Image (spheres, helix red, strand yellow):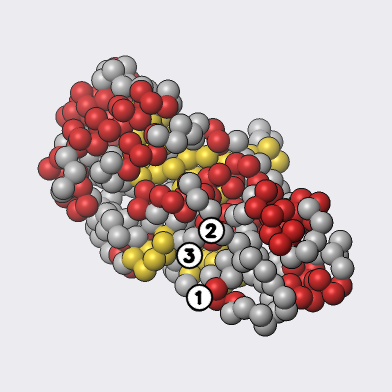
Amino acid sequence: MSATPLVSQVDSPNSEKLENIPPLLGASVTELTAWVQQQGQPGYRGKQLHDWIYHKGVRSLADITVFSKQWRADLAEIPIGRSKIHYRSEARDGTVKYLLQLSDGQIIETVGIPSFGKGGEISKSRLTVCVSTQVGCPMACDFCATGKGGYKRNLARHEIVDQVLTVQEDFQQRVSNVVFMGLGEPLLNTENVLAALKSLNQDVGIGQRSLTVSTVGIRDRIRQLAQHHLQITLAVSLHAPNQALREQLIPSARPYPLEDLLAECREYVEITGRRVTFEYILLAGVNDLPEHALQLAKCLRGFQSHVNLIPYNPIQEVDYKRPSSDRIQAFLNVLQQQNIAVSVRYSRGLDADAACGQLRASKS
């Protein structure tokens, strides 16, 4: 994995066009040390710069007070790579949705999801961030709001890492878990996702097993991900137990048969030793019948996996409904009877349109 090279030399704020200067966020302490030395500074400045970017949350090099005034002035226009909070809304359950404005004016969505202790107070030990990896999404899943707005571009490494730092600063709490389940298909932006995973782990300090990458399934990309031997969690958005129904719900699934996807997932387990999580959104009368559960169990029998059942979260554009509690429990019971590891995940942030499938980078 090759990181974006940092600008080699800065003689003055106007010595280079700023649009050609890659942001510093996402760079490792080694890269930052090499960079400051290129500016004629001692190597220890690299560790200081790393600390101010990742742990103090500095947004401008001009604000790093341990640097000399002259050098700060020279570097004032060098971009760190932080976004601006365009909009913020908080759901009744404490989940916070952020619309972040990027340097080119594009808007993405990020969600901060706190956990609660037994007394009902926010836990200081667990804070999850749901990050986006693209502006929009090209997958166009029929039940998901994100794909309704189309696809614009991939996010860069610093734009992914920035989302975590933004939530961390706003909550005034260390982020413990990151899920790549926001706008976009992560495995269509593999290079930047891998670079962001590395930075979140090594620079921000989040353990690999607390990082989850979700995918609808892109041919050969799961296999490629496995070759990096990461200890992250892979979550595959399945949503159907057969190819015909999957094509109906996920148009991009047409050229990628379900059996091929599952075979690639089995390879992932063999290579990494990590189980695969399968996400399954329950849609009333569509994919939530007992026969669907039996088909799903047949697909996953003998598989080192876990199924997350997600009751559907409504969006305006389609008429899908959430199943009744009895229907959800019946589906769960069938899988358990078939010895499939399974749980029900009720999404957070529903009243703020911040729940799974509702993200669309808009205030509504």
Foreground: disc 3 or disc 2: 2
Q: Secondary structure at mark 3?
A: strand
Q: Is residue 111 left or right of residue 39?
A: left
- The image quarter containing residue 242 is top left
Extreme residue in the left direction: 244
**Residue 15 seen in the current view:** yes
Foreground: disc 3 or disc 1: 1
The amino acid type found where label 1 is placed reads: Asp
Circle 1 residues within 10 Å: few <14, some 14–19, many ≥20: few
The amino acid type found where label 3 is placed reads: Ile
- The image quarter containing residue 36 is bottom right
**Between 280 and 39, the one nearer to me in the picture:** 39
Query: Given contact means CB atoms under 8 Å apart, are the residues at marks 3 and 1 in contact?
Result: no
Query: Given contact means CB atoms under 8 Å apart, are the residues at marks 3 and 2 in contact?
Result: no
Residue highlighted by disc 3: 108
> Which numbered disc, 2 or 1, marks the residue that appears first in the sequence?
2
- The image quarter containing residue 223 is top left
Which residue is drawn at the image coordinates 15% and 48% (left, top)?
A: 254
Q: Secondary structure at mark 2?
A: loop
Which residue is drawn at the image coordinates 71% and 57% (left, top)?
A: 53
Which residue is drawn at the image coordinates 76% and 75% (left, top)?
A: 74
Q: Is residue 318 left or right of residue 226?
A: left
Circle 2 residues within 10 Å: few <14, some 14–19, many ≥20: some
Residue 137 x/y as whole percent? 34, 60
Residue highlighted by disc 2: 4
**Between 340 and 49, the one nearer to me in the picture:** 49
Q: Alpha-carbon distance for marks 2 and 1? A: 18 Å
The amino acid type found where label 2 is placed reads: Thr
Foreground: disc 2 or disc 1: 2
Mark seen at residue 104: 1
In the figure, 125 relative to 16: above or below? above
